[in-house]
Image: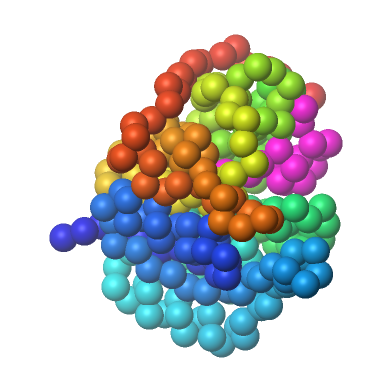
Amino acid sequence: MLPKTLTIAGSDASGGAGLEADLKAFQEHNTYGMAAVSVIATMDPDNNWSHGVYTLPIDVLEAQLKTAFSTGIDALKTGMLSTEAVIETAGKAIQQSGVKNVVIDPVMVCKGEDEVLNPGNVTAMKEALLPYALVTTPNLFEAGQLAGVKTPTTIQEMQIAAEKITELGVKNVVIKGGRGIAHDKAFDLFYDGDTHYLLETEKIDTTYNHGAGCTFAASVTANLALGLSVKEAVFEAKEFVAAGIKHGWKLNEFVGPVHHGAKSRFGAPVVTLTAIDPVAVQ
């Protein structure tokens, strides 16, 4: 029987991110993927590809969650949850389900946008989602918002943010640094509550990375459903998404998604996982 994985996320009409990316990653990892749609996200080619975010009614989300959880979920992730009510609905369902393999991808903005979807969402995530999370996977901006600090720009600042985030109840934090840290390599930080690890890969000169964050979190989720430890799940997910970015492709003049089948077809770039010295929270 295939492990059952669930994403509670937005639908990306372009197919590169959101639940579409999650389901592709679930499939590539040989798990049975399900989706509960929270919002529908669009990009308008007649208005400089600006984003539209259309939140589904809460009762529709509740009905989807009831269906999915009735099947017996092995691992789940969240993605774009556009309002406090949506976050609280998802959090309540996760808590009641008793699922332990919970990955929270705290999506706060659409790629290419620079405003938080709803400022109250940050507080709602802290209260309704993170206490039930085994792993959370913020990018640099999201890590700063959750930790209550400025957006990290160095590895040391990432460490401080990660430690502050675990104080919210989540057991493991992966801060996605990627190309946002000034270095000749791409770094992510993994903190398991005791030890800090750097995940390092080559920097890939590409803009075809649409859906990378969703894909990473979905890969962690699938790996947990398959029985991997958190460290193993994170490491393989980094390999998976690095391969996807390396072989990303042009969808249209605005967006290029990652290639979800890249690792199985072309192999993975070299990824290293190295324990580093702790930094005292300031």
Residue at image point 68% right, 78% down: 54
Could one spot residue 123 in this view of the protein?
no
Could one spot residue 263 in this view of the protein?
yes
Task: Give the vertical position of 190 relative to 228 (above or below).
Answer: above
Task: Give the vertical position of 146 relative to 64 (above or below).
Answer: above
Residue at image point 82% right, 53% down: 114
The answer to which quarter of the image holds residue 49 is bottom right
On screen, residue 235 versus residue 198, left or right, reads: left
On screen, residue 71 versus residue 249, left or right, reads: left
Residue at image point 57% right, 70% down: 13
On screen, residue 131 versus residue 244, left or right, reads: right
* Along the line of sight, the residue nearer the viewer: 155 or 193: 155
Provide residue 129's location: percent of width, then percent of height.
Answer: 59, 58
On screen, residue 258 versus residue 75, left or right, reads: right
Magenta-tinted stretch: 137-153
Inspect the magenta stretch and tell me whether residue 232 lies in it: no
Provide residue 179's location: percent of width, then percent of height.
Answer: 67, 30
Inspect the magenta stretch and tell me whether residue 143 lies in it: yes
Task: Give the vertical position of 177 relative to 195 (above or below).
Answer: below
Residue at image point 83% right, 57% down: 115
Quarter of the image where the N terminus is located: bottom left
The answer to which quarter of the image holds residue 72 is bottom left
Provide residue 190's location: percent of width, then percent of height.
Answer: 54, 30
* Along the line of sight, the residue nearer the viewer: 8 or 253: 253
Q: Residue furthest top?
A: 277
